[in-house]
Amino acid sequence: MKKVVVIYWSGTGNTEEMAKAVAAGAGLDGVTVQLTSVDKASIEDVLSANAVALGCPSMGDEVLEESEMEPFVQSLEGQSLSGIPLALFGSYDWGDGQWMRDWMERMKKLGVVLVDDGLTVQSTPDDAGLAKCKELGAKLTSALA
């Protein structure tokens, strides 16, 4: 059975809502989906998955959350992730999405296959934003075929 892992960090709950929607979209027949907050995630979760989604809101000066998500992403930079389908998502309150563009570039350098541009939703995801999250999850799963 194929496995998709969705790992996220959320301070206000917005990115957690997005993560749940990504996981729902990825949950097709024959696919196991693991939804995990980054504080409970391990490198093995990523390495044992057939596809991965990572979610984190924009923080501070448009960067990843620095105490949990950033160290987790740094730990991935030492792994062989070439060819793994990957989706990135997150919420933001202000800015122009620079944190997501930077994150996409970092992950591309690891050899992952981004299934789409990083998905950003301003503040609390509405129905349209959650639908885009589900679509992203479905794209991640379809990359397994």
Image (cartoon, rainbow, N blue to C red):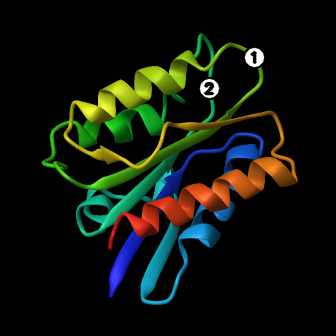
Amino acid at pointer 1 = Trp
Residue 108, how many percent across, how many down?
A: 28, 34
Residue 10: in sight, yes or no?
yes
Rate crowding at label 2 as few (under 14), some (14 to 19) or many (20 or more) other CA atoms within 10 Å: many
Disc ID at residue 137: none
Image mark count: 2
Q: Out of 47 and 130, give the one closest to the viewer.
A: 130
Q: Which residue is mark 2?
A: 58
Rate crowding at label 1 as few (under 14), some (14 to 19) or many (20 or more) other CA atoms within 10 Å: few
| The image quarter in which residue 71 lies | top left
| The image quarter in which residue 31 lies | bottom left
Disc ID at residue 94: 1
Left or right: 133, with 44 as reference point: right
Q: Are marks 2 and 1 in contact (CB under 8 Å)?
A: yes
At mark 1, the secondary structure is loop
Left or right: 111, with 121 as reference point: left
Residue 35, how many percent across, how many down?
A: 54, 67
Mark 2 or mark 1: whose residue is earlier in sequence: 2
Amino acid at pointer 2 = Ser
Distance (Cα) linking label 2 and label 1: 8 Å
Residue 100, how many percent across, how many down?
A: 52, 27
Residue located 41% across and 49% down the image = 115
